[in-house]
Image (cartoon, rainbow, N blue to C red):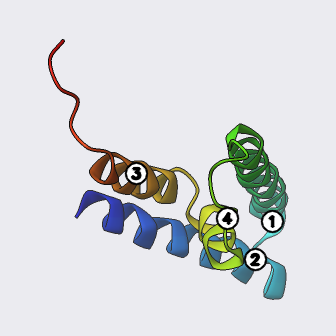
């Protein structure tokens, strides 16, 4: 539930930043929004690049849809993916 709320918030942030490109806000806020957009694109791109770099050759390649979701939702998509990965692994036995 929390992950879905985070995804919704990320969509609203993207919408707010993209709206600034179409209809720029007044002068001081306009520049802040442009910097925030550049920062968000760089951070989400870096996150996607690091995810791709950490995958082993044994793991399946990431689909384009998943890569797009990681770029859009960032850490929230990564948390959902991590939760899915943990659910797939069998529980560890005691040694």
Query: On the image, which quarter does residue 81 sit in?
Result: bottom left
Q: Residue 10: horizontal and vertical position, in percent?
A: 52, 66
Residue drawn 62% across the image and 79% down it: 15
Per the image, label 2 sits on a secondary structure element best described as: helix
- In this picture, is 7 found above or below 28? below
Do residues under tags 1 and 2 come within 8 Å of each other at their CB atoms? Answer: yes
Q: Mark 4 or 2 closer to N-term?
A: 2
- In this picture, is 12 found above or below 19? above
**Residue where numbered disc 3 is placed:** 85
Q: Residue 13: horizontal and vertical position, in percent?
A: 57, 68
Q: How crowded is the residue under tag 2: few (<14 C-alpha within 10 Å), some, or many (20+)?
A: some
Q: CA distance from mark 3 to mark 1?
A: 40 Å
Q: Nearer the viewer, residue 64 or 72?
A: 64
Viewer-nearest of labels 3 and 1?
3
**Residue where numbered disc 2 is placed:** 20
**Residue where numbered disc 4 is placed:** 62
Describe residue 81's horizontal placement relative to residue 15 as left or right: left
Per the image, label 4 sits on a secondary structure element best described as: loop
**Residue where numbered disc 1 is placed:** 30
Q: Mark 3 or 1 closer to N-term?
A: 1
Q: Mark 4 or 3 closer to N-term?
A: 4
Q: How many numbered markers are drawn? A: 4
Q: Residue 5: horizontal and vertical position, in percent?
A: 32, 66
Residue drawn 77% across the image and 61% down it: 37
Per the image, label 3 sits on a secondary structure element best described as: helix
Residue drawn 40% across the image and 51% down it: 85
């Amino acid at each position: 539930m929390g992950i879905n709320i985070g995804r919704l918030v990320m969509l609203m942030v993207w919408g707010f930043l993209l709206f600034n490109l179409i209809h720029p806000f007044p002068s001081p806020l306009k520049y802040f929004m442009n910097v925030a957009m550049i920062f968000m694109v760089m951070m989400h791109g870096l996150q996607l690049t690091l995810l791709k770099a950490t995958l082993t050759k044994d793991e399946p390649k990431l689909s384009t849809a998943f890569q797009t979701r990681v770029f859009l939702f960032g850490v929230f998509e990564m948390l959902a993916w991590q939760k899915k990965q943990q659910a797939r692994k069998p529980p560890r036995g005691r040694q």
